Each structure stands twice: as structure tokens, then as C-alpha cells.
Image (spheres, rainbow, N blue to C red):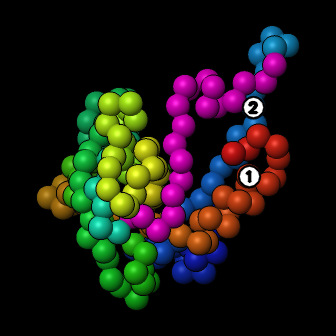
Amino acid sequence: MSATWNNTGGALPNNGDFGLIVLHDQSFSGAAPVSVKTKVGASFTAVTNNLANTHVTILGYPCNFNSCNILQRNDSSDHRVGSTAAGNNAFEYGSDMAGGSSGGPWVQNFGDPLSATPTGVRNLTRNAVVGVTSYGFTDPNVEILGASGFNAEFAAMLSAACANATGNC
């Protein structure tokens, strides 16, 4: 949990609604430990300060589709939320995903790098997570999800988690 989240009592929107979970590699039947990346066959890169003015793919398991059982994808663009609690690091994107999608990644340049390599001068990292779903609205007519952009506070949390044990990152 971020200090910003803790210091604001979890008010939404929020500049620091993100956290990290460190998983330990698992050994099965005496075999060498297997990492989550190896087990699922994919990984994302976390990138800071890239949630503004970008297009993302939002992934999640919203309960309003397939009873929370099937991964859903939503592609959208941003609107910065300007409130006292949020400052300038909270964003809302259009989405029809509802409850159950919380914690899902907001991925910039989502896709296979061999078939869709981005060009330009900005945001070239493939499969870069720039935020995670923080909140949505209970009114089904308001199709919006919110997230805090990964920032320096997130980068410090990630560095600490990576330094905690060899192979964490």
C-alpha cells in the first residue's frame, strides 16, 4: 500500500491507489522453483509517468460479463481527474467493465512486439503497465474506471520489492 493511499484514508480518486504483492517461487515434487512468469508464460513491464494522454488496454474479470470468469479487454483513452484528493495523478477512462475488474492492469502498447512494434518518439515500451483499475461507479449508466498513474512513489515501492530477494524482478 502506498503512503499516499494510507495518508488520505483511501479517498477516491487518489494519487496513490496502488500496491505490490511479492510472490515466492514454488517448487513441485522436488523440482527447481518455478517463477510466476515461467508458469503463466508472460510478463509486463511497469512504467511510471505514462498514464496521461495515452491509449491503454484495460484487462480484468468484470462480474457484469461471464460471471467474473473470463478475462475481458477494453481499449480506451484518458481524462485526468482534478480533485483535492487526487491532485493530478488520477485518471478515468471509458469502460463498460464493472465490479470484479479492480486491480486489473492498464497496459500501454499491448500486444505482440513482433507484429505491432510501435513507432514515434514517446511511449515505445511494449506491454507497459501504467496503472491498475482502482475504482468504478455503481451506476450502470456511468461507464468509467479510475486509476492512479504509476509515479515516483510506485517506483520506490517497486525498487524495494525488487531488492528484497534475488529474482524478484
Name the spot of residue 151 as percent of width and height, x first.
53, 70
* Label ID, residue 25: 2
Q: Residues within 10 Å of mark 2 (few under 14, many from 20)?
A: some
Start and end of the magenta stretch? 32-51
Identify the residue under disc 1: 162
Check the picture and name the quadrant holding the C terminus.
top right
Task: Decide if residue 112 is in sight here.
Answer: yes
> Which residue corresponds to the image point at 73% horizontal and 44% vertical from the top-left?
168
The residue lying furthest to the bottom in this view is 84
The residue lying furthest to the left in this view is 141
Q: In which quarter of the image is residue 62?
A: top left
Give the secondary structure at mark 1: helix
Q: Quadrant of residue 110?
A: top left
Q: Is residue 79 above or below residue 128?
A: below
Q: How crowded is mark 1: few (under 14 residues within 10 Å), some or many (20 or more)?
A: some
- Asked if the residue at tag 1 contacts the one at tag 2, i.e. Cβ–Cβ closer than 8 Å, the answer is no
Question: On the picture, is 124 further left or further right than 76?
Answer: right
Instruction: Say what amino acid the circle numbered 1 marks.
Output: Cys
Give the secondary structure at mark 2: loop
Name the residue nearer the viewer: 76 or 49: 49
Name the spot of residue 65 as percent of width and height, x first.
26, 36
* Label ID, residue 7: none
**Lower position in the chain sequence, tag 2 or tag 1:** 2
Dominant SS in magenta: loop
Name the spot of residue 97 as percent of width and height, x first.
27, 47
Name the spot of residue 80 as percent of width and height, x first.
30, 74
> Which residue corresponds to the image point at 33% horizontal and 46% vertical from the top-left?
118
The residue lying furthest to the right in this view is 30
Q: Would you say residue 67 sits in the magenta stretch? A: no
Q: Would you say residue 49 sits in the magenta stretch? A: yes
